[in-house]
Amino acid sequence: MSEILKIEHLKKYYVKKKMFSSKSSIVKAADDVTFSIKKGEVFVLAGESGSGKTTIAKLILKSIQADSGKIIFEDQEIDNQKKNLEKIRMNCQMIHQDPYDSINPRMKIGDIVSEPLEIHNAGNKQQRMKRVIEVLQEVKLEPAEEIIKKYPHMLSGGQRQRVVLARALALKPKIILADEPVSMLDVSIRAEMLELMKELQTKYNISFIYITHDLATAKYFGQRIAILYLGKIVETGPINQVLENPKHPYTQALIDAISEPDPENLHKEKRIRIKEAQETGNFKGCRFKARCLYAIEKCSVEPELQKVNQEHYSACYVKLD
Ligand SMILES: Nc1ncnc2c1ncn2[C@@H]1O[C@H](COP(=O)(O)OP(=O)(O)O)[C@@H](O)[C@H]1O
Ligand SMILES: [Mg+2]
């Protein structure tokens, strides 16, 4: 598989003003982030809320500007030239966590799905309508001829998220950036939506960046994963390897948090491998140090990603089992 998208040393810092004070602090929303995605691959960006996932998605689509770093799509660096912005925005579509972030409640479904086609001047009116019907059928919103006449409030939450998926698919993108696409849905319909995304991903060999804080859905959908902590990738590799043999204490803590309690071991103390601490952007050395149970003196120097094996990397000096 060849690489379709490369992200190199992407950096975005925010200055946050402290309330009721003249002081400010720096938030490192993306801190030297590097990864690449192959054609047809599902790459997961996982981490807690505030770890920088949405920032990275917005940087890729150039809806916000990076302080530094490169985005390379199909071997072409995406700078701010109009033709390059158009190229990335046509080929790379975003699905937001909240459907209302991307659909206008006053527009009919047909117009919502057709909008990206209009923006990018794809086909004439008749061809666009044909594509809208086709893509609504793909996401199993039927009868499509009826659905196009409805308004978003007339649909269920799950149906609205399918509209968002249809809209993202309309231009036949090569990459879909899905930012927590199922986290606002009822648990009962999450699996259905994930299955649909997987089916269409496979059918059209679309590359996905699947953004989530939920490692269970990540494992179902993804092939490789990067674990983000305060804007930095602290562990990355093939998803089964990272989740079954995590090397970074933060990844281990995330996995502990979701693992089912083992009835045989209920009497044993649950492993708690993370300390409560408020981080700021003003850390020195390893950014996880304040919460880490294994921190050693060396951790006052920021660890870089080190090879665990093949494609598996972790940014930690301590060799954990
Ligand atoms: N426009 C902004 N101004 C200031 N800080 C921001 C802005 N956008 C995001 N941040 C901060 O950057 C960090 C990463 O945010 P975000 O990318 O939204 O994380 P995630 O999507 O993982 O929850 C957070 O600390 C957030 O408060
Ligand atoms: Mg987010």
Image: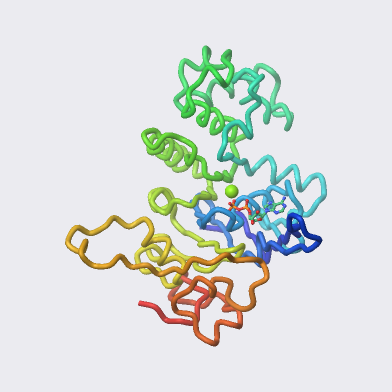
Left/right placement of residue 67 relative to residue 153 reads right
| Residue 304 sits above or below residue 91 on the image | below
- Residue 246 in picture, x, y percent from top left: 40, 68
Q: Residue at x 43, y 61 (%)?
A: 254
Tell me the quarter of the picture where residue 192 sits: top left
Q: How is the image coloured?
A: rainbow
Point out the image quarter for the C terminus.
bottom left
Is residue 127 something one can see in this rendering?
Answer: no
Tell me the quarter of the picture where residue 20 sits: bottom right
| Residue 163 sits above or below residue 93 on the image | above
Q: Residue at x 21, y 61 (%)?
A: 266
Is residue 222 something one can see in this rendering?
Answer: yes
- Residue 271 in picture, x, y percent from top left: 33, 68
- Residue 108 in picture, x, y percent from top left: 62, 17
Q: Residue furthest bottom?
A: 297
Q: Residue furthest left?
A: 264
- Residue 150 in picture, x, y percent from top left: 56, 15
Q: Residue at x 50, y 77 (%)?
A: 316
In this rendered view, identify the residue nearer to me: 27 or 128. 27
Left/right placement of residue 15 relative to residue 169 reads right
In this rendered view, identify the residue nearer to me: 166 or 281. 281
Q: Residue at x 48, y 41 (%)?
A: 183
Total number of numbered discs in the rendering? 0
In this rendered view, identify the residue nearer to me: 116 or 18. 18
In this rendered view, identify the residue nearer to me: 222 or 138. 222
